[in-house]
Amino acid sequence: MTEPGLPDEPRCGRTPVVPPEMAETVRTILGSEGGTASSDTSCLRHPDHPDHADNPHYSLLADLGAKDGGAWTLWRGPNLLLVLLPWCTTLEDEPCLLFHGHPGPCPSSQPSG
Ligand SMILES: [Zn+2]
Ligand SMILES: [Zn+2]
């Protein structure tokens, strides 16, 4: 399943097990901020991304709009973290679709030829 706008690139694709409390928190954020819950909560990182303490999986739980960024979950093993982060603005011409300060290169910045 591909979300519109996301680059068609291989992705890690692991899905977080979001605890009910966290899902409720996201719903609360969406209620007050006005945004859309992401239907694709799989890890957006490269399939070969390192899996250690400084490199958790991350997936978008909710899109809070162009200005407000997104609600993300960063996780490694059973430990999930809910964070609100602004969008990455490294690319000026096209949205990177990851959060500001994400590790690694922007998914859309790969040379295409
Ligand atoms: Zn991952
Ligand atoms: Zn980026």
Image (tube, rainbow, N blue to C red):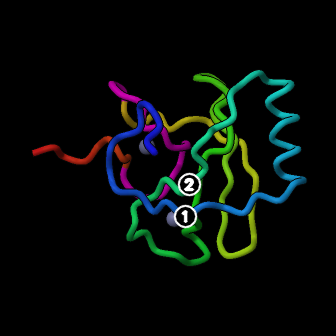
Give the magenta range: 92-105
Residue contact between numbered discs 2 and 1, judged by CB atoms under 8 Å: yes
Q: Residue at x 76, y 58 (%)?
A: 18
Whether residue 38 is situated above or below residue 68 in the rendered picture: below
Dominant SS type (magenta)? loop
Residue 48 occupies quadrant: bottom left
Q: Position of residue 108 (x, y in %)?
A: 32, 41
The single residue placed furthest to the front in the displayed view is: 1
Q: Is mark 1 within 8 Å of ligand 1?
A: yes
Q: Position of residue 67 (x, y in %)?
A: 62, 22
Residue 11 occupies quadrant: bottom left
Is 18 displayed left or right of 98 in the figure? right
Q: Position of residue 76 (x, y in %)?
A: 65, 72
Is 68 displayed left or right of 94 in the figure? right
Give the quarter the ligand 2 occupies.
top left
Residue holding disc 1:
14
Q: Give the residue type at disc 2.
A: Ser
Task: Compare residues 20 and 80 and report the one nearer the observer.
Answer: 20
Verify whether residue 67 appears in magenta.
no
Task: Compare residues 5 and 74 and report the one nearer the observer.
Answer: 5
Residue 26 occupies quadrant: top right
Q: Residue at x 74, y 74 (%)?
A: 78
Whether residue 52 is situated above or below residue 64 in the rendered picture: below
Q: Position of residue 2 (x, y in %)?
A: 43, 42
Residue holding disc 2:
42
Q: Residue at x 34, y 56 (%)?
A: 10
